[in-house]
């Protein structure tokens, strides 16, 4: 049985207030239209829903039965409409982001700070992992979009936008500080302990390719899950690591670690926004993505 939803909504308000005129005011309608809609609903259902009283109307037994089912439905619909309005006005909602440690520190953190100050009621969920894991999260639909570091392997269903270039530098701790006085090649670098992101990460793939192009095998002595673990290992003299220049700037200036002068040139890498072309972003996620793009235009390269 197909019944116009408006009929049920009008029925709900007439039953709630037990008065056609008050229901009309609540619905910004007029009393004749309200009466006509109730009559149409009664005709469609084949029963009388209201009986008149001296003060208005009251539900018949059939009306009571219908009302018991209509109340939760109307309340759920109105709650949904209110929630959508709040999300549209960015007063409610959740944004889920997949990201890497480098992308988080280089771009995402300052933008999240601005976003949170502007929209304090929006909740943010961050899945911090490697680029492949962040892309898998995007593919599974568990995040709205991902902010990752190159190289990025992706299918046609994804759209990738580069938002910032960054450079890695090889760094070491104090016990290997003697290496900073010379220009060192990858071959000699390989003779010392290397610290790297784990196999399967974009950074591991990137340096495997660089070493291979120079006839060398990339075989780090220590592998870690996220980039933030490399720096403390370098500081504690466990080996040499490649880290984003901006990330280690203060540690280089304080003399806690040292930059090595590499003979071979290491090409820049990129921080990228990745999203699924087949999935529309919500209002809050779209706003955050646009803030990231705007930030990259102003401060990206």
Image: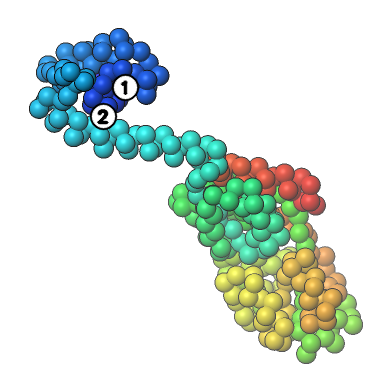
The answer to whether residue 66 is seen in the rendering is yes
Q: CA distance from mark 1 to mark 2?
A: 8 Å
Q: Nearer the viewer, residue 29 or 264?
A: 29
For numbered disc 1, what is the local secondary structure? helix
Residue drawn where x is 67% and y is 45% of the image: 291
Instruction: Compare residues 149 and 111 and report the one nearer the observer.
Output: 111
Q: Going by the image, does 62 lie left or right of 251?
A: left
Disc 1: CA contacts within 10 A as few (<14), some (14-19) or many (>=20)? many
Of pointers 1 and 2, the one earlier in the residue sequence: 2
In screen coordinates, is 88 left or right of 240? Answer: left
| Quarter of the figure that contains the N terminus | top left
The residue where tag 2 is placed is 16
Element marked by disc 2: helix
Callouts 1 and 2 close, C-beta under 8 Å: yes
Q: Residue at x 66, y 59 (%)?
A: 109
- Which residue does the image show at 77% across and 51% down from the upper left? 300
Can you tell which quarter of the image residue 259 is in?
bottom right
Establish if 231 lies above or below 69: below
Determine which residue is flagged by label 1: 23
Q: Position of residue 197 (x, y in %)?
A: 62, 71
As drawn, which residue projects farthest toward the left? 61
| Image vertical order of residue 133 relative to residue 211, above or below | above
Residue drawn at 64 percent across, 72 percent down: 228
* Label 2 crowd (10 A; few <14 / some 14-19 / many >=20): some
Q: x%, y% of residue 184?
A: 84, 78
Name the one closer to the observer, 2 or 65: 65
């Amino acid at each position: 049985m197909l019944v116009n939803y408006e009929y049920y909504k009008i029925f709900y308000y007439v039953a709630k207030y037990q008065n056609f005129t008050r229901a009309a005011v609540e619905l910004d309608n007029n009393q004749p239209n309200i009466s006509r809609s109730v009559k149409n609903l009664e005709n469609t259902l084949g029963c009388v829903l209201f009986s008149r009283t001296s003060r208005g109307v009251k539900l018949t037994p059939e009306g009571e039965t219908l009302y018991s089912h209509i109340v939760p439905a109307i309340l759920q619909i109105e709650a949904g409409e209110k929630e959508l309005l709040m999300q549209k006005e960015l007063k409610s909602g959740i944004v889920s982001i997949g990201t890497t440690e480098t992308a988080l520190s280089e771009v995402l953190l300052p933008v999240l700070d601005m976003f949170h100050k502007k929209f304090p009621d929006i909740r943010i969920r961050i899945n911090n992992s490697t680029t492949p894991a962040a892309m898998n999260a995007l593919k599974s639909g568990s995040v709205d979009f991902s902010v990752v570091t190159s190289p990025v392997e992706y299918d046609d269903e994804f759209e990738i936008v580069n938002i910032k270039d960054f450079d890695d530098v090889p760094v070491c701790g104090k016990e290997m500080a003697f290496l900073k006085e010379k220009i060192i090649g990858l071959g000699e670098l390989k003779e010392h302990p290397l610290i790297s992101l784990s196999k399967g990460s974009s950074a591991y793939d990137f340096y495997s390719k660089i070493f291979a192009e120079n006839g060398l095998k990339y075989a780090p002595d220590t592998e870690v899950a996220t980039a933030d673990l490399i720096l403390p290992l370098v500081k504690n003299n466990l080996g040499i690591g490649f880290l984003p220049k901006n990330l280690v700037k203060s540690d280089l200036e304080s003399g806690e670690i040292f930059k090595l002068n590499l003979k071979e040139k290491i090409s820049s890498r990129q921080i990228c926004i990745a999203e699924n072309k087949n999935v529309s972003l919500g209002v809050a996620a779209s706003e955050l993505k646009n803030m990231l793009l705007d930030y990259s235009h102003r401060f990206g390269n």
